[in-house]
Image (cartoon, helix red, strand yellow):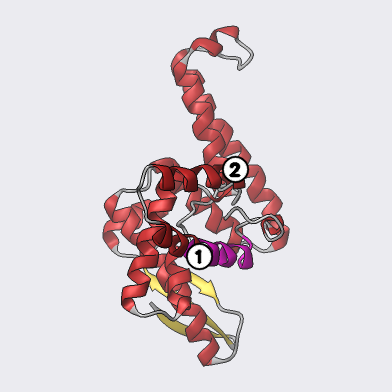
Amino acid sequence: MYIEKRRRKYYAIHTIPEDVRDAFQGHKRFTQRLDTEDLGVAETRARLWDVRWRRLIKEARSKSVDQVERDALYWRKLLEDAPEHERSLIRDALADEAQSKIDRTLDRLGIMDERDPRLADLPEYAKATTEAERFHGIATGKLVRFDEHLEEYLATAGNEAKTIAVKRSAITKFGEEFTYVSDVQRKAVQAWVTKQTLDGLRKPQTLRRVLTGLRLYWGYLISIGVAPDEAITVPPF
């Protein structure tokens, strides 16, 4: 990752390795305007983007993210980077892309109309519909993985390496049960806490530390607009 000045503004740029470019529609680099003329501020902002881009590259290499999610994340970045007047067109294209995933399944099934009553009994159609909804949700930012912004958060936390490792482990483990931010609801979290206690999975003092770490991370998600504002008055933890 490097920083470049263009027309008085700094940009963060990260070359995408050749072995994973197919996962990013063939693009050769990530580019992000940092909206500052101050080099120190630019370097701070660029570090957060560097963490995010390295995570995407790592996921592409490990294939830990499925194709639906990978495609959706590409569309989300396209939507985020687009000027305001172009976003409605991109959203329309997104809706068309989501529908095309269903249409391709209909073609394979030899069915011409989604109102066909036979579809209710076909698992292929149910799967295609679920994937289309998930694709659209991720691409539009309505579905965000709970740990998606974890590395960015840890980069700003200012903790020692050991503390960072403990936080990363606890938040990652929680994210295995609460995949998306929208899954983190107060009753579900209370049930999770009860299970941790009753099953003896964590000692009370350990669980309190975990919950404190989760609260701090949740606060970060609210601050960057990923978790809903109403979660401030009715926090899930």
Residue 34 pos. (x, y %): 56, 78
Q: Quote the CA–CA distance across marks 1 and 2.
A: 18 Å
Q: Secondary structure at mark 1?
A: helix
The residue wearing badge 2 is 187
Please indicate whether residue 142 sits to the left or right of residue 105 in the image: right
**Residue depicted at 33% across the width and 68% down the height:** 165
Label 1 crowd bin: few (<14), some (14–19), many (20+), radius 10 Å? some
Magenta span of residues: 213-225
Counting residues from the start of the chain, the first of labels 1 and 2 encountered is 2
Amino acid bearing label 2 = Lys
Q: Quadrant of residue 30?
A: bottom left
**Residue depicted at 37% across the width and 47% down the height:** 65
Verify whether residue 30 appears in magenta.
no
Label 2 crowd bin: few (<14), some (14–19), many (20+), radius 10 Å? few
The residue wearing badge 1 is 212
**Residue depicted at 58% across the width and 43% down the height:** 137
Image vertical order of residue 11 relative to residue 218, above or below = below
**Residue depicted at 55% across the width and 12% down the height:** 120
Please indicate whether residue 45 sits to the left or right of residue 207 in the image: right
Classified by dominant secondary structure, the portion drawn in magenta counts as helix
Question: Which quadrant, please, contains the C terminus?
Answer: bottom right
Image vertical order of residue 184 relative to residue 77, above or below = above
Amino acid bearing label 1 = Thr
Nearer to me, 207 or 132: 207
Question: Which quadrant, please, contains the N terminus?
Answer: bottom left
Task: Work out whether residue 56 can be spotted.
Answer: no
Residue 160 pos. (x, y %): 36, 80
Q: Residue furthest top?
A: 118
